Amino acid sequence: MEIPYLLDTIERYKSDPESVYNTWFVTSEERLKAFRSIRRGVQEIVKNIAEGTFGNDFKGSVLEFVLTAITEQKQVFEGAAHPFYWKPKLRIPDIYENSANQQKFGQFLEACLIATREDQLVTAMNRLASAQIKGVGPAAANIIYFLHPTLVPPFNTAIVNGFNALFNDKKKLGSWESYLAMRETIMRVNAHSEVRPHLSKDLGAFVGLLFEIGVGRLLIENNVNSVLENIKAQAEKVSRLRHDEVIAEEKAESEHTEVQYLLIKIGRALNFDVYVARNDRHRSYNGQSFALLTVPQLPVTSWGNDVMETVSLIDVIWLKRETGEIVSAFEVEKSTSIYSGILRMEDLARSIPGCTCNFYLIAPDKRETEVMAQFARPSFRTTLADMSLAFIRFNDLRHHCDGLCQLGDDHTIMRKIARHYTPAQNA
């Protein structure tokens, strides 16, 4: 493969407005939020395995919630959870009934969590590969990508097919040897002096390119013959599905923006300064610019960079005008993981010394049962006891917005429409 040919392919990939580069890598707010919440989820997996509370099935485990958060990250990760489903007839993956294998898997995740260098990650992956745990293959890299996005590329059928077509290779899907060799090539090519300026140090951009080639949306010399066999039917199907997804995302984004605007409106009416997530300040609703309605940045604090990064991505924050103290924080979860949203709120509460602010998850009415089920999880019960976390339905916020603005004296007015978990709900 010649570099000029690769650069031309990259340019076609980046210029397609519906490519995963443009719909996920450079524009998705959820991609940015996912990294920290997935890390927290992996930490909980490691803790559960160490304490012997991980369980003997994928369903209901912390691993399921982590993989759910990953599969929400656009088409690149579609199917990422499948390799981890418990298949009783095959007894795979063998990390649910075999405690020794479960411990090895937990040790692998812990090693990746604490790794700070590339060689440590490669050692951890080689050690997991050498353990030969039945059913546990390089699909595990999809988890580790969210811990080390510049060192570990994701892995699935489409990515392998794209790699083989681009590099005229024959790498195998379920082989750790193939994955590690692929990873080395991806790292080297992505770091090439002529390639690096066109993509990113984050390997998600390069893997997105491989994915587009692998599914046949991006044609190159080596995949033309296979693509042409079913190009018309497949291209029309992919295009239709992608179009429908883009339309659905635009609708969800519009609703997300509407809810943010309502929270901004209420916060200002209650005489608070309002901060909106830094990557949403360019938005507007009904001609009302968020940049003109909100403060440009958070107050200067002694929080660490990691904490500030988390706080700066919270959807809406109300601040006391005199002191800049956080009064209430709101996360809008239209279709993304409720579990991840709770983790972000919990992370914020634990990161701010003496935090007494109020936290709210805002989600569609139809997700109320899901929210309350998450609130009822044993791992969150202590969290809910230590922090003020409640749920507000989209339609309640819409219907009562003007009343809250007119009748509210302070932030406590939000409790009138909020729903809290109580043990009786789980009885």
Image (spheres, rainbow, N blue to C red):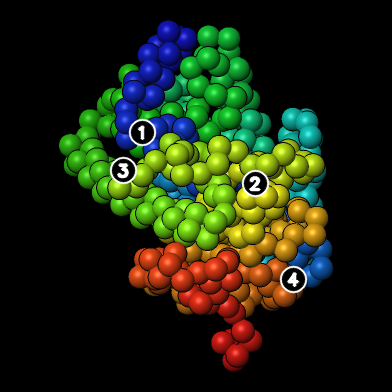
Percent x, y of residue 408: 50, 69
Calculate the distance from the C-alpha at mark 2 to the C-alpha at mark 4. 20 Å
Calculate the distance from the C-alpha at mark 4 to the C-alpha at mark 1. 43 Å
Q: Choose the circle earlier in sequence order: 3 or 1.
A: 1
Residue bearing the label numbered 4: 386
Residue type indicated by callout 2: Thr
Percent x, y of residue 390: 57, 71
Q: Choose the circle earlier in sequence order: 2 or 1.
A: 1
Q: Secondary structure at mark 1?
A: loop
Figure check: 23 above or below 419: above
**Image quadrant in which you'd find residue 153:** top right
Q: Choose the circle earlier in sequence order: 4 or 1.
A: 1
Give the class, few, some or many, for how many residues have Cα within 10 Å of label 4's Cα (few <14, many ≥20).
Answer: few
- Is residue 277 shown to the viewer in this render? no
Calculate the distance from the C-alpha at mark 2 to the C-alpha at mark 1. 27 Å
Calculate the distance from the C-alpha at mark 3 to the C-alpha at mark 1. 29 Å
Contact (CB < 8 A) between labels 4 and 1?
no
Taking the image as shown, residue 394 lies to the left or right of residue 182, namely: left
Give the class, few, some or many, for how many residues have Cα within 10 Å of label 1's Cα (few <14, many ≥20).
Answer: many
Give the class, few, some or many, for how many residues have Cα within 10 Å of label 2's Cα (few <14, many ≥20).
Answer: some
Residue type indicated by callout 1: Ser
Residue bearing the label numbered 2: 310
Q: Choose the circle earlier in sequence order: 2 or 4.
A: 2
Percent x, y of residue 223: 33, 26
**Image quadrant in which you'd find residue 118:** top right
Residue bearing the label numbered 3: 287
The numbered disc on residue 214 is: none
Calculate the distance from the C-alpha at mark 2 to the C-alpha at mark 3. 28 Å
* Residue drawn at 69 percent across, 53 percent down: 325
Q: Nearer the viewer, residue 99 or 385?
A: 385
